[in-house]
Amino acid sequence: MTAPYRSTVLADARDGFGRLLAAEWTKLATVPRWRLALAASVLLTVAVAVLTAAGSQTTGGGGPPARLRPLSDQGRITYQMLPGDGALTARVTAQGGGGGWAKAGLIIRADLRPGTPYAAIAVTPGHGVRLLSGYRDGGPGGAPGTPPAWLRLTRAGTTVTGYASPDGRTWRRVGAVELDAPGPAAAGLFVAAPDRVEVQRQFGGESISGTPADTRASFDNVTLTAAGGAPVTGPWRDRGGAGGPAAPDPGGTTRTGGTVTLAGSGDIGPDAFADDVTRTTLTGALVGQAAIVALAVLFVTAEYRRATIRLTLAASPRRGRVLAAKATVVGLAVLAAGLAAAFGSLLAARPVLRAHGTEPPPLTDPAVLRAAVGTAVLMAVVAVLGVATATILRRGAPAITLVLLVLLVPQIVATGLPVAAARWLQRLTPAAGFAVQHTVRRYDTPIGAFAGLGVLCLYTAAALAAAAWLLRRRDA
């Protein structure tokens, strides 16, 4: 067995990491094709963003701004105006239809406009009594909530507290939320239920169809009192269907004696099927990364092909530091290109999206900024993964193919799998890193933004460790 080549040059100040970085940067900056690859990654990413925006469905312009926290604000509400602090109490006597997340309970909200902040306590067939706010599922609670069940909401300043009771005498505090609703607020009864949605997936795409889920609930012992305990007087009003500040729709509300029955459809909660405009705009990174991977791999394998790697290792015998310098230079160069690609995509796509009826979220929004910067970091980590893979395989074509396969195949295969299986596939593979581009939590979101990027970083760190070990053991 031939002994691995080792330099006889002593490691001294000439082997400083700063000098290594300068040497590797000189190699990258002075070769035209490396500069062209960086430019190509930016141009491809931006071009795909513009084409994707141009292919969006035209709605005639003037569409509403894309929500970074998409929500559904429908259901049915019957309410009175609470002038200030006070308490709302009622007993849910019956509930039916709508599935496990059907809601029947009490609500206080600043006004009736869609998307208005609110606090609510509700009985749900599958999840017990829940204190709800912020258009999210879940919240404090979880106690059994099968009707009949007593509920109460109290308002004191900006704090709304929810209580539940089995008999109307012994009350258990469920939780409290902050509600920024100065002055009078709408307080009343509501029912809501998520739509029934069917997702059909096939390789390369999916179709989503939804139908409203009807729900119904009955209430009695309804009392609304002001801070001093005096009953609130005034007419009860109804909001149904699409909602709005002036959307009277009493058709689903009946009052018989002291019993109020509400029937309706639509949810007050998250919209798990909304479009993520920012993520869609940044999908050009999938194409731009091809140039990045080619750059990172060939930056290493070109030295093996020309045997100049021997000169590099002779000048810098500490091989692990050579690998670190190559990864650092390529990673930083790609990070700069990635920032240009991400922000260029968002800026170039904005006028096209507006022309097709979609107002994209502002670039200054923290979620959009995180997705843009995260895309640049994603591309830089992919480049480092390419450097590590090229060092392991020492051949350009297999290394490029392998890196692209581990990034793209899980995303392609996931489109043909059931949602639960697709989530696990995208959580456990390097493709998890693309979660950093998400700004909307959807039904198929596999993993959090930073957790997904962390998964990709772990794979990259493992590849770098293997590359460093092999570089030290093998002949150049």
Image (spheres, rainbow, N blue to C red):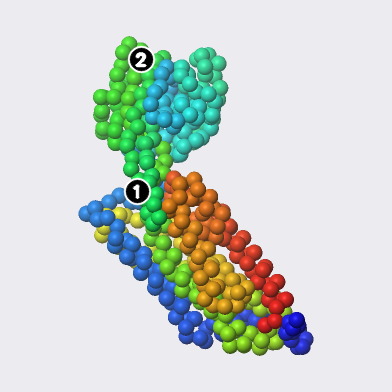
Amino acid carrying mark 2 in the image: Thr
Which of the numbered marks, if any, corresponds to residue 222?
A: none
Mark 2 lies on a secondary structure that is strand
Is residue 350 toward the left or the right of residue 453 in the image? Answer: left
Q: Residue at x 62, y 80 (%)?
A: 21
Which of the numbered marks, if any, corresponds to residue 259?
A: 2
Residue furthest to the top: 257
Residue situated in front as seen by the camera: 423 or 337: 423
Give coordinates of residue 386: x percent, y percent.
56, 71
Give coordinates of residue 391: x percent, y percent.
62, 75
Q: Residue at x 50, y 67 (%)?
A: 404
Is residue 241 toward the left or the right of residue 167 in the image? Answer: left
Is residue 165 toward the left or the right of residue 262 in the image? Answer: right
- Quadrant housing the N terminus: bottom right
- Note whether residue 223 is visible: no
Kindly identify which residue carries mark 1.
207
Give coordinates of residue 472: x percent, y percent.
72, 76
